[in-house]
Amino acid sequence: MNGKQTIDARAPQDAAALPFQGIRVLEIGTGTGVAYCGKIFADFGAEVIKVEAPGGDPVRHWPPLVDTGGGRHESAYFAWLNTNKRSVVADLHTDAGMRTVGELLSSADVLLDARALDTQGQAQNPALTAGKPPHLVEVVFTWFGESGPYIGHVATDAVCRALAGTIHSAGPVEGPPLIPHDTQSGIVAGLAAFGNAAAGLLGRAQGGRRYVLSIHEALLHLVEIDIGLALDGRHQSRSGINRFGNQYPASIYRASDGWIGIFTVTAAQWKGLCTVIGKPELAQDPRYLTGPDRLARADEVDAILNPVFVTRTAQEWFALCAEQRLPAVVVPTMEQLLTQAVHRERGAFIPVAIGQAHFEAPILPQRLGVAGPLRGGRAPLLGEHNSLYEEKQGAAAPQSADPQTSPSGRLPLEGIRIIDLTMGWAGPFATRNLADLGAEVVKVESTAYPDWWRGTNYSDEFYRDCLYEKNAYFNLMNRNKLGITLDLTSAEGVRLLKELVAGADAFIENYSAEVLPKLGLDYAALSQVNPRLVMLSMPAFGSNNAWSNTRAYGGTLEQASGLPTVTGREHWPPTMTSYAYGDPIGGYNAFTALLIGLAAQRKSGRGAFIDLSQVEGMLSLVAPFIIEQSAHGKVGPRIGNRHPVFVPHGCFACRGNDDWIVIAVTSDAQWVSLCRAMGRDNLADDRTLATAAGRRQQEDAIETAITGWTSIRSADEAMAALQAHQVPSGVARSIPDLFRDPHLQQRGFWQRIERPFVGHYLSGSSYYREQGQPAPVRLHAPTLGQHNAAVLKDILGVTPAQFDALSAAGVIGTTAVSRTPKSRGPTQH
């Protein structure tokens, strides 16, 4: 097993080994985001106190509902989000409630505050100043930050997602764009917020911190591949269901017994697919030579593939494609997903309870063995722990540091060194987040095998004109990092990397499973060099199982998670939401996993191997449906852009060409406001529409009325009118629209960064702000080998003569060299 730590889902866990044991987290407010952030802390040992209003968190009433005993029914999804927490009821509109929370806050280490996400759309979020400890790490959840034109806007997950540009490219060509299920946005927000909170804890010897999270900007990071395409002049309008980017086929096809997901990027993969389906001559057909060619003729390609794929089972196609190393997976239903052996063997589903109800749900994907996460748990009933804290008021949680009274001006992860052997999107996104928070990230490439996000068209022009320095993808993803080159096929390159590892805190890689063991750089070898090293690998399906060598891209991960089978409308095929959804989700999960590993390292003084299955990271996005399948034995029909709780909810056509607005009515009062805004007092006065249940009975007619109003207005005009009446609404921004978005412009989200070879490039900012400012851009994305001298000479002590010898031998360099076939593709996953 290459010396890797084997995860046994049934093995006992040592509570003392959980990295956040002794940390007290206070969670205030509602929503998936704050709950999921708190869940990560709780499942890794923190004492998480969930403060609920007297009526309870509204998510307690979200489907699927389960019988908790005594005639009560509560949300099974709420239970999963809140395992291993404690519930305290306090009314923050009363002095008594404020005193209760103030007492709890006085002994807290972390405050997760989502009060700004209330139905009044408050952007400002006053702190609970009484008794606030100086070492507190505070993360404030907002829709749009604390500045800019949108701060007064009322929002929901769907509204925020629309304004972040994440929906416009999905769905039928004629529209409307496809809105993913709300809870997915919350998972992203929770992961992002946890990153700030955990980093703040790691750096709190410098003092307390207050981070303000913009969910809007956290979601915008989901479409950075599309932003890169737009910056390179290659943006395309919506291409249709399961058609994204500039490659094809990257879609889902009916097999004889289900569905098979195909993701073809390189010329070699297209050739291999043609061979697998018994039509090798297609690989030479000039109509289908490139990905853009095939996308332009997608209907023709599908007409060829559809009759072939229905001749075998999905499992048979999966096996045939695996033999050719082609990115292809079974696209499972929830029933199939819960029985797949690879997930069962890894313990991907764990028991959850609330009251008398029991069911299965996804485990957190950040696996540290005995250090967590907890393999299941119980969620609290409303106010279950009030008496516990009434008895213990004023009792402080154990403190793990002796913090100063104010931040020192340093970033929280300063002094932490991370060696980065990742390429593409997921891994570099994880390490960019760590670098933004102050970690010293040393990105290792080679002159023969640079990061494939620098480009994959290995033509003479690629090398002659240094196109590898001009790719917007790479430049977006690699700010604030040091970049070096090492030839890891040479003994000297391996020796130098091990010297770097000896002085590092963490190491991350996303190579194919067989690469590092062949080089002598797997965890067994590196832990001998540095016993306290935290190493993270991020294969698609985890290590040491039957699917570990499965080739996968971000779209493959979405397909394999089963998410497409619960997305879209009932008569559609299983429907993907974006070109490479699994990549940013994998990046967010790897980011949090490394922070948890660093916290465990600091507590124990020992290292760890983190085997991050990126598909498991996607399962949190599908959790409501996995839970529904487990609790009720089936899932309900797909409902497209409609919502299981809110009515009306959807994406509506506006006056302009491909101009759309998302409207999400979350309360009966907002329904009346919507009617008043549209001048439809008759609808507001119709008592049959006064409740969501009544409106659901007439949802078609309501949507027709809304479209009649929106279709004679631009999307921005409609949003302004609706927001003036406090109706949650947001323009479905296209990717090019993001660069002109008034909110992002006023906040200075887009930054122009100077860099050799391109003069400047456009970069986004961090999704959070501290003291009103985003994370500083200290370094532009490195040119190839830019920091060879700084790292090798200053860190490793290489002499000038040794440095020159390494350059002469080609172990290091600053210019890409052609040593591989031009069809070479990425080697990740």
Image (cartoon, rainbow, N blue to C red):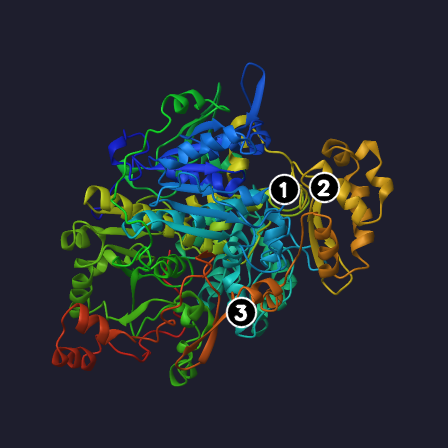
Residue at the image position 57 percent from the left and 48 percent from the top: 311
First in sequence: mark 3 or mark 2? 3
- Say whether marks 3 and 2 touch (CB < 8 Å): no
Q: Secondary structure at mark 2?
A: helix
Residue 383, percent across and down?
A: 49, 24
Quadrant location of the N terminus? top left
- Say whether marks 1 and 2 touch (CB < 8 Å): yes
Quadrant location of the C terminus? bottom left
Residue 686, percent across and down?
A: 84, 35
Residue 375, percent across and down?
A: 36, 32
First in sequence: mark 1 or mark 2? 1
The residue that mark 3 highlights is 229
Kindly report the distance in space between the C-alpha atoms of the residues bearing marks 1 and 2. 9 Å
Q: Secondary structure at mark 3?
A: helix
The mark lying in front, picked from 3 and 1, is: 1
Q: Residues within 10 Å of mark 2 (few under 14, many from 20)?
A: some
First in sequence: mark 3 or mark 1? 1
Kindly report the distance in space between the C-alpha atoms of the residues bearing marks 3 and 2. 38 Å
Residue 225, percent across and down?
A: 50, 64
- Say whether marks 3 and 1 touch (CB < 8 Å): no
Residue 364 in view, yes or no: no
Residue at the image position 56 percent from the left and 54 percent from the top: 144
Q: Residues within 10 Å of mark 1 (few under 14, many from 20)?
A: some
The residue that mark 1 highlights is 119
Residue type marked 1: Thr
Residue type marked 3: Leu
The residue that mark 2 highlights is 670
Residue type marked 2: Gln
